Amino acid sequence: MKLSWVKTHWSIKKLFSNYVWDIANKENKVYLTFDDGPTPAITEWTLQQLRNFNTKATFFCIGDNIRKYPEIYQKVIQEGHSIGNHTFNHLNGWKTSTAEYLKNSKLCQSTIYNLTSTSNNLFRPPYGKIKPSQSKQLRAMGYKIVMWDVLSEDFDATISPERCLENVLKNVTSGSIIVFHDSLKAFPNLEYALPKTLEFLREKGFVCERID
């Protein structure tokens, strides 16, 4: 996921108002999300950090990773976190036909259903890139297209772990949807930033909740 803004500007949210960018509330709630898992060791480490702070989150999973690591995926479910569809093969919607994108997304959905026997209505496009035609059909299928308010940029190997943390702490507000990644590429930044983010949120009175 590589886009140019860390804090999503209000004008982008207004232009793409059919997407969920944040969740307004009066209870100081924020929403941690993790993309691209499940990943051996890293997703389990992430779950441990969330347990340490009694925190729930939302995991936007790649279907092929669910297929390869069903036991880790089941741990995410068992610990009370919510799951979102991140396509089966992490497709870039701008570079993929609508028919192929929908087919791949449905394959991810069937993989989720086969393991949990539950329906799922959360979808996040990989890279944040999705065509209007793809979005329209997914929303007609009942999906919420969940984007973000704060991007940690943990996936970016050119930034320091301290910068990753700063991206979150300087931009989080009540209602923020925050993006991290439980992936190999992101782990050097995630390992530093996530525990400190959780500690900061607790100290500032934020409540972390899953998206449903």
Image (cartoon, rainbow, N blue to C red):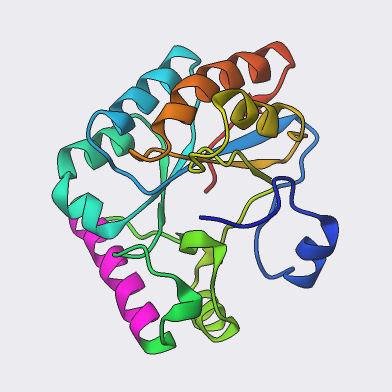
Q: Residue at x 75, y 29 (%)?
A: 28
Quarter location, residue 70: top left
Residue closest to the eye, 8 or 4? 4
Quarter location, residue 92: bottom left
| 170 is higher (above) or lower (below) than 185 | above
Residue closest to the eye, 16 or 209? 16
Look at the image and tell me whether residue 89 can be seen.
Answer: yes
| 137 is higher (above) or lower (below) than 53 | below
In percent of width and height, residue 125 lies at: 49, 64
User: Any magenta on residue 101?
Assistant: yes
In percent of width and height, residue 2 lies at: 55, 56
Q: Residue at x 57, y 58 (%)?
A: 146
Q: Is residue 154 left or right of residue 164?
A: left
Q: Residue at x 54, y 69 (%)?
A: 129
Look at the image and tell me whether residue 141 can be seen.
Answer: no
Q: Is residue 123 left or right of residue 47?
A: right
Q: Residue at x 41, y 81 (%)?
A: 96
User: Any magenta on residue 96?
Assistant: no
Q: Is residue 37 left or right of residue 133?
A: left
Check the image and name the residue furthest to the front. 158
In percent of width and height, residue 140 lies at: 52, 80
Q: Is residue 31 left or right of residue 107?
A: right
Residue closest to the eye, 140 or 95? 95
Check the image and name the residue furthest to the right. 11
Residue closest to the eye, 25 or 163? 163
For the record, the magenta segment spans: 100-114
The secondary structure making up most of the magenta span is: helix
